[in-house]
Image: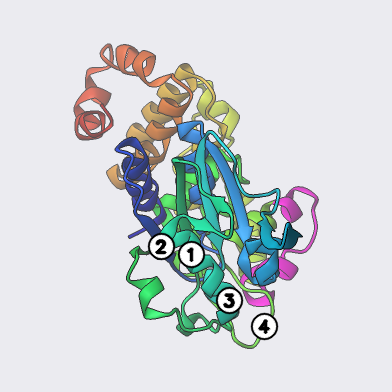
Amino acid sequence: MHPGHLFEYLSTLIAHRVQHSVMIWGPPGIGKSSVVAQVAAQRQIGFIDIRLSQLAPTDLRGVPVPRDGITYWFPPEFLPRDGAGILFLDEINLAPPALQGVAQQLVLDRRVGNYTVPPGWFVWAAGNRKEDRAAVFDMPAPLANRFLHLRVEPDLDSFRHYAIGRNVHEQIIGFLNFRPSLLHKPDASSESWPSPRSWEMADTLLKLDLDLAPSIGAGAAAEFRVFRQAAAQIPAIDAILKGKSKEAFPQEPSVQYALSSGLVSRIATVEQALHALRWLSRNAAPEWVQMVAADLFPKLRARKLFDEFSRQMRDDAGLMEFLADFLALAA
């Protein structure tokens, strides 16, 4: 499944209070832990992210303390005591077998030492696969058999919608639309390579006018520089959003992708959205109008502008006919 499907799946488990433990498998850098954090935020519940590979067994089981000839285990302060939330055991298969054994008690029995997981908390975990060049340990069969196993792969649509919501630079979104294979491309010869996580880091560097190679690698950074040079040729976006542009739709593919992502990123009002779609429907091939609409509609929904946009669309018969399928899907 892709990250968008993962979000929906996990949200459904919480909505129906399904407390089976979940194991999320996937390559590094695709946002597994970010999706879990988003689910917790959307459901307005707690979220505790424990990186098991950074702990010792006593860090999780607790410290043994003698009292009246009996050893009591004092649990760590980072484990939840009440309320509801997600206890997320990240990097579980990077942890050595001794620590996985302690974690197994949390997963199987919802308890460890003298500590018991509160009823409102879900116990989920995540890890990388052996084929991802991660130094992982085999998961014991009894532990693996207690999980629901979800496998996640990088997905451009999911990342694009996430990036738009996070105000990632429009040129990064446009470049990945143009070069989708560079969304996630591990490179065994380099410490830095493209992934959804490293592209989000690249966004920070780009906004500071710094070289992107430390985050995405020299090869991807060089391609991005060429793309930026081409993107300088895009029509004036402000004029399009004001309904005053007389320019034609560009012919160079990289410029087309840059313009499309730039329009979606900069649209902030219903009026701007209508102007952009009208200009595109007059000047661009249908697939470009559809591409912009597919990214724009979720953005309008997230900002609670879609209902007003739909009302105003009814006054434009041409756009209504052209975008009827997308409006039906977005309703």
Q: Secondary structure at mark 4?
A: loop
Give me the C-alpha separation between circle 4 and circle 3: 21 Å
Which residue has dot 1 on it?
A: 105
> Is residue 1 shown to the viewer in this render?
yes
Give me the C-alpha separation between circle 3 and circle 1: 17 Å
Give me the C-alpha separation between circle 2 and circle 4: 39 Å
Looking at the figure, which quarter contains the C terminus? Answer: top left
Q: Earlier in the sequence, mark 2 or mark 4?
A: 2
In the rendered image, which quarter is residue 201 located in? bottom right
Instruction: Find the residue positioned furthest to the front.
Output: 68
Q: Secondary structure at mark 3?
A: helix
Which residue has dot 2 on it?
A: 108
Which residue has dot 4 on it?
A: 190
Establish if 28 lies above or below 113.
Answer: below
**Magenta part of the protein: which range?**
204-221
Which residue has dot 3 on it?
A: 94
Identify the residue at image location x=54%, y=81%: 136
In the rendered image, which quarter is residue 54 located in? bottom right
Q: Earlier in the sequence, mark 3 or mark 1?
A: 3
Give me the C-alpha separation between circle 1 and circle 2: 5 Å
Q: Based on the picture, tell me whether residue 270 belongs to the magenta stretch.
A: no
How packed mark 4 is, by other alpha carbons closer than 10 Å (few <14, some 14-19, many 20 or more), is: few
Specify the amino acid type for callout 2.
Answer: Leu
Identify the residue at image location x=62%, y=49%: 79
